[in-house]
Amino acid sequence: MKTRIILCGACGKMGGNVLSLLSTDEQAVAVCGVDLFPREIGIPVYTDFASVKEDADVIIDFSSADNLKERLEYAKTHNVGIVLASTGFTADDLALIDEYAKTTAIFKTANLSLGVNLMQALVKAAAEVLGDNFDVEIIERHHNLKKDAPSGTALMLADSVNEAFDGKKKYLDGRTGICGARDKSEIGMHAVRGGTIVGEHEVMFAGEDEIITITHSARSKRVFAAGAIRAAKFLHGKRAGKYEMKDLLAEENN
């Protein structure tokens, strides 16, 4: 049976990429969309979840952190999973997600790219080997319309590095003025915004007389759309809880 998907943010760029990939997918189908600015895209599109008539198995949410509770409540009430594919969540949002995960299957990751999730493992391994002898700086680059900084992926990578230091490193967002010598406890975070950059992340380990850099560059938004569809298929039928990419990869490689 195909995984039936409600696509939130259906009329945006990511929604278009998801629909394009689903048009040839034999295991999943979009039954309808939800978007504040509906238009003709080949499936019914509603302005809110209260208007949805179709039965579904999973929501793919490529909208924003706004009105998060509406989406989570719909998922809980209708017993469907939800893939949270947006970033920029506040501490209160994250607490709300944890609360709903007690009764709802929720897939949340800062980045749906397989390559970025491999990068996560690589930077953690590098940090474990290099230790405090190397300073860690993270540079992320995105298009000029991105609203949050640093990106969710940059924070995810920083957290992976920090696991090697038992969470003792502190994150420093950029530097300005006479800020003094670099503290060993810092992970520097730097955000670049410009043009139509899809997403680039660089983790630099700078030691004495040598630098190791691990990078990932997304050349198209389709990689994130493909990841969201994989996540929706994975989430179909799962019991309540919070899931992430490592759970999906573990199941696929079993």
Image (cartoon, grey):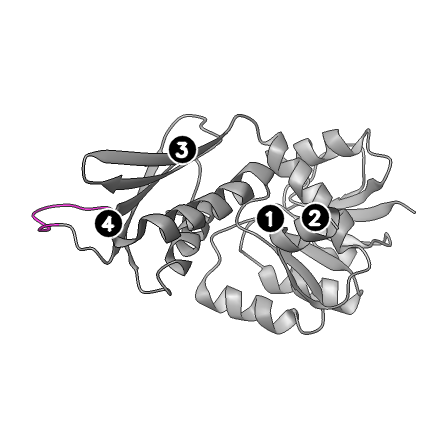
How far apart in space, not on screen, are marks 3 and 4 (Cα)? Answer: 35 Å
Q: Residue at x 83, y 40 (%)?
A: 29
State whether residue 242 is above or below residue 24: below
Q: Is residue 167 left or right of residue 10?
A: left
Type of residue at label 3? Asn
How far apart in space, not on screen, are marks 2 and 4 (Cα)? Answer: 38 Å
Type of residue at label 2? Ala
Q: Nearer the viewer, residue 249 or 144?
A: 249
Type of residue at label 1? Ala
Sequence-wise, which precedes: disc 3 or disc 4? 4
What residue span does the magenta drawing correspond to? 173-181
Which residue matches tag 3? 144
Crowding at mark 1 (Cα within 10 Å: few <14, some 14-19, many 20+): many
Which residue matches tag 4? 133
Give how far across and how far down residue 26 sits, in percent: 87, 35
Give the main secondary structure, helix, strand or loop, of the magenta stretch.
loop
Which residue matches tag 2? 231
Picture quadrant of residue 98? bottom right
Which residue matches tag 1? 85
Sequence-wise, which precedes: disc 2 or disc 3? 3
